[in-house]
Amino acid sequence: MTQASYSIRELAKHVGGHVVGDESIMIERIANLENAGDRSISYVDSDKHFDTAAVSGAACLIVPSANNRPQFKSPALIEVANPKLAFSQIAAVLHPPILREPAIDATAVLAKTADVALTAFVGPNAVVGEYARIGPDTRVEAGTIVGANVTIGSECVIHPNVVLYDGVSIGDRVILHAGVCIGADGFGYVRDAMGYHKFPQIGTVVIEDDVELGAHTCVDRAALGRTRIGKGTKLDNMVHVGHNCDIGERVVIAAQTGISGSVTIEDDAVIGGQVGFGDHTRVQSGAIIGSKAGILPGKIVRPGVWWGIPVQPLADYKRMNAHLGRLPEMREELKQLRQRIRDLEDKLKT
Amino acid sequence: MTQASYSIRELAKHVGGHVVGDESIMIERIANLENAGDRSISYVDSDKHFDTAAVSGAACLIVPSANNRPQFKSPALIEVANPKLAFSQIAAVLHPPILREPAIDATAVLAKTADVALTAFVGPNAVVGEYARIGPDTRVEAGTIVGANVTIGSECVIHPNVVLYDGVSIGDRVILHAGVCIGADGFGYVRDAMGYHKFPQIGTVVIEDDVELGAHTCVDRAALGRTRIGKGTKLDNMVHVGHNCDIGERVVIAAQTGISGSVTIEDDAVIGGQVGFGDHTRVQSGAIIGSKAGILPGKIVRPGVWWGIPVQPLADYKRMNAHLGRLPEMREELKQLRQRIRDLEDKLKT
Amino acid sequence: MTQASYSIRELAKHVGGHVVGDESIMIERIANLENAGDRSISYVDSDKHFDTAAVSGAACLIVPSANNRPQFKSPALIEVANPKLAFSQIAAVLHPPILREPAIDATAVLAKTADVALTAFVGPNAVVGEYARIGPDTRVEAGTIVGANVTIGSECVIHPNVVLYDGVSIGDRVILHAGVCIGADGFGYVRDAMGYHKFPQIGTVVIEDDVELGAHTCVDRAALGRTRIGKGTKLDNMVHVGHNCDIGERVVIAAQTGISGSVTIEDDAVIGGQVGFGDHTRVQSGAIIGSKAGILPGKIVRPGVWWGIPVQPLADYKRMNAHLGRLPEMREELKQLRQRIRDLEDKLKT
């Protein structure tokens, strides 16, 4: 592979930054402060890393404006308001995602009625069902199974061995990592004396634009209606989203969290890993839920920081933990008071 | 697709119900109360939804008998003992699962010794190993890997990208959702000074009739003997079942629960999501275990409702939480008693 | 399949054991004590099982030395220092893993630049990308996707439907169970007013020799640098390993544990199931962490046994639980003391 390179002038222009030092230096790669060398660019945005940045070998550092930082002796600096964001944007330029030549691999199996854009890529042994539609510049990687009547928008990356059940809908610029499963039946049964009978699961799933789902995340179809993942929402690996959930826009959910049926999570909520949601809960916009929390069915989680099983405001959780920490001392005090009362009782007797 | 339609008379007969109103209306689809329209059928079985049902546009409502409900003005009603069950049964008639024409896709890879029923379907890029047997009317969808000596019964649906390791056995009418993995090695090692050595994992897995396993659920093979999932049992997505487990009949387990090796769960137990079982535990018939509970190794969980980490009877759990809630008040009281004792001591001194 | 058989003399020699009884008996299979019969070998290493061993039908028992056990009446015994280990070693001889004839299946899709050893096996519908290298005696099973520039060592078993993203590196004798995913993007974003922007994830993953990963375990690539799983480490099913983690040698991690980004776990640590690690935590060599524990970001877990959410030394956890158990009694005592003080106050008034 040949390596693209850009001058610091070009990179600074791309992120709207101001160069201090030699803007003609050519940059080839991003790096962290410790490993950065001659043709590398790195960033620093917090006092914690100022010392490391001071001795970094990076040819260029992306930094906050001069009054928010010490002097750095790197050959060049790019000053911006948000160094981490600028670093991400520059990384995307220096290390663009692999582009596939538009092609349908000879071993892919496409239904005759499938509609694949001319600029799409369909990898080896991928399967595309009847009436499925795949948009321009979208990549469907090896071994991925696209069901009948599935719609995939433009510029998506569907990694290997993903399964899209019949009829689900994927927006534009969506990234689905390996093993993602969209549209399996929700978990619903009716019990009678004989055992469990399947409750109908005939709804669908809608994944909106700019969503990214981590490896092996599963989103079940709705019983009736649809399960939704809103625009710009990001889920980590192995998240479970039950039937009829409505996840809003720009929500972030960390790995292994499990969301029961009919849960609503409003825009911009932030959810930790291994959290468990009972069914019919609602998380309001502005809520932040710590890892491993548990939310009882039907609960409404209001804006603020929440923690624990069952979930409670972080301040309450901390207060309770402080009380718990004083239990040994309380027992000791009880013992002393008991003795003092006994002494008083003895004295009064005499 | 043409849409099947049935008269209310036919549907009522199918579920053994009694029609009130116009039994000649034709029904095409199920719907929930809010969205139901002209050719839709819906159901109501609880007071909570009587108001919604009263204004529903459904052509037909499935309802409890007249003395358990108000009047509804829908064009037709079907009275049954269990409306939700009847609704499920009618859904199965109106929205039958997709039927595949019996076929072995040209891109499927079948071992010469594999025995596939004439009425079975094997999808694109599926792989069927030596001496594997696939029963009548069973669907093996795209990308699924069936190992050597695997037995699959009749009328099963094996969704895409499932992996069945060599030698495992699947009953009749089993549904395995995408990515299910049956028969991977159990997690067993012997440690010596050099590190970990694999303990033999040469047993098998038996999945009995009418089992449904959610997407990405994994059931490990036994070290010796077999891991079993009993008849009619339903597991949600991403459940982990360790080696040598014996899960009984009509057990229900919600998503992301993890079951260590050699756990026994008796018939009709109900287990929430994200529960964790230590090895060699036993759950007795009649036990209900709440989500996120943790069960210590070797524990016997008796009939009743259980909760918490470690698991305890729900009543005890609630009582303990009530005590915890009073900790601040107890500390306050301790402080007051201390003062009153000091006052008494002072008085006695004088 | 023909069944290999070995004399007890041969088996004892293989494990360096001493035979008591008839060393000419031929053994065909391993079995547990309860089911063992004529041509079976079993083992016993703890008092708990001495009674079962005494009535076992096994032709041969692997046992501790004579002064650590009662007499057993089986036709033959093999005395060794570690019976369970010897049993595992004998199992590997009697039940060797399936060997595949070296072959590249006609349906596998290999890039022209891929370098596959002559003695390797590549199964049906597997895909091997550009410049990928697969070492001698390695099996890549059906449906597995090997990305570009991936390196796989010798004698590995890569089970079906595994996904190895571009550029990851797998050592020798590694076992990856079905559905394992190595090298998906780490979960890192930069937020601005518009929403979340992807932080670059351009590092790689290194899986060292003798690692075994359970079904559906996911190991994310580093943002920069590498995520590492050290030599001889064993992970159970559905473990999540975030970007930039450094897991040492001979570490054991049970099912469904989730490890956030930049976590370090030192050699020989033992981690239970469903544990959750906040980012930038460090687990020191000699630490044992119980199932379902939760570790706060940045925490250092020192040698010893740890438990709970948040994690604390097991002794502290037990002490706290003992205190909690006495809460009802404390409240009762508070009530009594209050009454006694009131009595004293009344007396003093009069």
Image: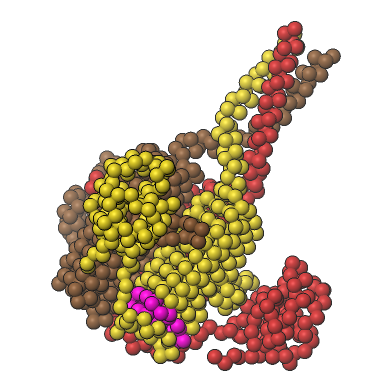
Chain colours: A red, B brown, C yellow
Query: Can residue A301 be seen in this snapshot?
Result: no
- Please provide the residue range marked out in magenta: C120-145
- Residue at coordinates 41% horizontally, 52% vertically from top-left? C80
- Residue A41: percent from the left, percent from the top? 69, 82
Which image quadrant for residue A133? bottom left
Classify residue C137 as left or right of residue C295. left
Q: Position of residue B245 (x, y in %)?
A: 34, 51
Q: Is A61 located above or below residue C340 in the figure?
A: below
Depth check: B62 or C227 in front? Answer: C227
Residue under the point 55% across and 52% down? C289
A315 left or right, relative to A79: left
Residue A277 seen by the camera? yes
**Residue C134, magenta (yes or no):** yes
Q: Which quadrant: the N terminus of chain C?
A: bottom left
Question: C143 and C177: which one is in front?
Answer: C177
Q: Nearer the viewer, residue B226 or B54?
A: B226
Q: Is residue A220 magenta?
A: no
**Spot occupied by residue C161 in the image (x, y as percentages of width and height):** 37, 72
Residue drawn 75% across the image and 11% down it: A347
